[in-house]
Image (spheres, rainbow, N blue to C red):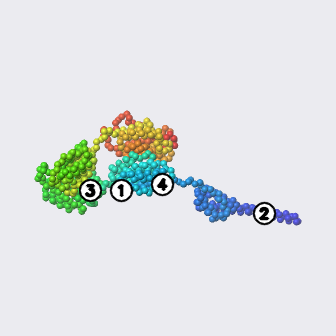
Amino acid sequence: MRLSSLLLSTAAFAGAAGLSLVVAGFAATALEDNSEIVVRRTLDEAGLSWAEVVADGLRVELSGVAPDEAKRFTAISRVGAVVDATRIIDMMEITPSKGIAPPRFSTEILRNDAGISIIGLIPAASNHAALIKRLSAIRGTPQVTDFVETADHPMPKGWADAMAYALKALALLPRTKISVEAGAVRITAIADSPEAKEQLETELNRMLPPNVHVTLDIAAPRPVISPFTLRYVLGPQGGRFDACSAESEDSRRRILKAAKDAELRVETECTIGLGVPSASWSRAVEVGLSALKELGQGSITYSNGEVTLVAAQGTAQARFDHVVGELENALPQVFVLHAVLPEPEEQTSDATPEFSATLSPEGQVQLRGRLSDDAQRRTVDSYAKARFGTGAIHLATRNVPDLPAAWPIRVLAALDALAQLERGAVTVTPDLVTVRGMTHLENASAEISRMLSAKLGEAEDYELDITYEAPPEPEDRLMAPALCEAELAAIQRADKIAFEPGSATVAADSARVIDKIAKLLQQCGEIPLEIQGHTDSQGREEMNQNLSQARAQSVLNALRARRILTGSFVAKGYGEDTPIATNDTEEGREANRRIEFRLIESELPEASGDDAAPDTDDTAEPDDAEADSTDAGTNEETDG
């Protein structure tokens, strides 16, 4: 009995021990799973998904690669809020540091009438002192304000070329802001006129380095016209403008309509500009031209708010008084009328004092007639030599007393007018200044009229008879545009332009092809030319489009570096949209990777028979020219 009881007790104890072990195992597993779930949820809610969690009994092991030390500390803190910190085993690593990134070098240069200011961060190797010295040496700069900081880091690629170009551009632009970065320059400037804007853009493009990207934003505001002048002359053969100014398109339209009603005989363009003395300018001109038409003949001159009406000699006094009275009442406020009815001539022409100056086509000037005294004679002689050159003056005047008080002013104003002609003559009398001659400047008549109005005064009369002739063509005539296009295609048939694989950099072997093209373009002049970039269909369409644009721009930059005038050139990428061969073969893809030079037909002037391209054997047929004027990109199939 005792033995059985002992065995039964032992078995019961062993069974209880086994059951305890099983229950303990299930409890430990449940604790591990619960800890791991809670910790994982906490990390996910904190956005720390990079951390890994493993529960081993009461231990919670954290592993993974933290972006930085702060993220690692955040993970430990978050887990420590849900489990005992003593249970956390940190096995996390930290992403190795990439080091301190180099600074972004950039600078802005501002220039205006007050001087130059420069601000930004530049590499120490670019020589800060030398930079300020070059800025101070720019002509017309009173002072340089320096806000530049330097950093001792390697100079980025393209920085030196970009800064050198910016300094050259700054010397050309008296009012500008230039932003400089490595390999990139942005220029914002103001030009005095549309013509000056075009000239500046041409010059800036000419000196552009091939590895610098430049953005130009040059504005050409309306010119300031001072004095704001208009002069209309009505004679037996009809009317003409010697000068015409307007403040807006609507004002110009109204003035030209009024001039046509007053027998305008030649088409004229009014200059639109700033400086109008009154918002009623066009109304004042309309009533003035209407009054002049009623008189029949004469002239009317507007110089700011001063209006001078000169009737023809012999106009009836009653008619003159009626027209002047009506005009005085019709003119808007601000405008003051001076009316002149010339008296009949009672003196012979020999008794009338006169001064004349004649300019020959060779530039020689003859000065004849009457001056007051030796002092005036020396003044006129010196002034003429300053305007026309010391060796070009022949003085043959005589001194006469009792000349009008304004005689010296009228003589010097006449010489100023003569200086704007290629050949011609001016005559000065007590009542009239006459200017006759030829000029190569289309707006010379308006400029001379504006100048005489300002110098002679409000009630003085002058007469202009100025003809315009186009400047003579240079002896070496330029090649016809169509022939230039064909010759460009012929050059590329013989030797194509190539690029580095997968990039927009012109291959070194293609430098001589660019040289040939540049030499030909020097004979073509500023023709409207589109430099087209094309690719094959390999790769993504967007990538091909960008690559074709970059390659076309690289060719344009290469031509600029060779001092070709590219103001009328445009770089445009067409991507894979215009293949000339199949893209299913390597030969076809090679043909589709190309640069083409195409005339912009809409911007070509109408060609006369003499200017038309000759029909020679060198001119390719249209299909052949298009197929053969190709540019090889690379031989790699993946290179769009």
Residue toward you, 152 or 177: 152
Kindly identify the amino acid type of the residue bearing the numbered disc 3.
Pro
Residue 57 appears in the rendering: yes
Mark before the other along the chain sequence, 3 or 1: 1
Residue on which the image places disc 2: 17
Residue 348 placed where, x, y %?
Answer: 11, 50
Q: Amino acid at mark 2?
A: Ala
Marks 4 and 2: which is nearer the front? 4
Residue marked by disc 1: 113
Residue neighbourhood size for the residue with mark 2, other residues' Cα within 10 Å, grouped as few (<14), some (14–19), many (≥20)? few
* CA gap, disc 4 and disc 2: 79 Å
Mark closer to the observer (3, 2)? 3
Residue 248 falls left or right of residue 509: left
Q: Are marks 4 and 2 in contact (CB under 8 Å)?
A: no
Q: Of marks 3 and 2, which one's residue comes earlier in the chain?
A: 2
How far separated are the C-alphas under marks 4 and 1? 27 Å
Give the mark nearer the N terminus: 4 vs 3: 4
Amino acid type shown at disc 4: Thr
What residue sits right under mark 3 in the picture?
227
* Circle on res. 150: 4
Q: Residue 492: where, in percent of width, then height?
A: 43, 38
Spatial CA span between label 2 and label 1? 100 Å
Residue extending farthest to the top is 617
Judged from the image, the secondary structure of the residue bearing numbered disc 3 is loop
Q: Residue at x 19, y 59 (%)?
A: 338
Amino acid type assigned to the residue bearing label 1 in the image:
Asp
2 or 1: tag closer to the N-terminus: 2
Q: Where's residue 154, x and y in %?
A: 50, 50
Instruction: Count neighbours of disc 1 (C-alpha within 10 A) and say few if under 14, some if 14 to 19, many if 20 or more.
Output: few
Q: Quadrant of residue 13?
A: bottom right
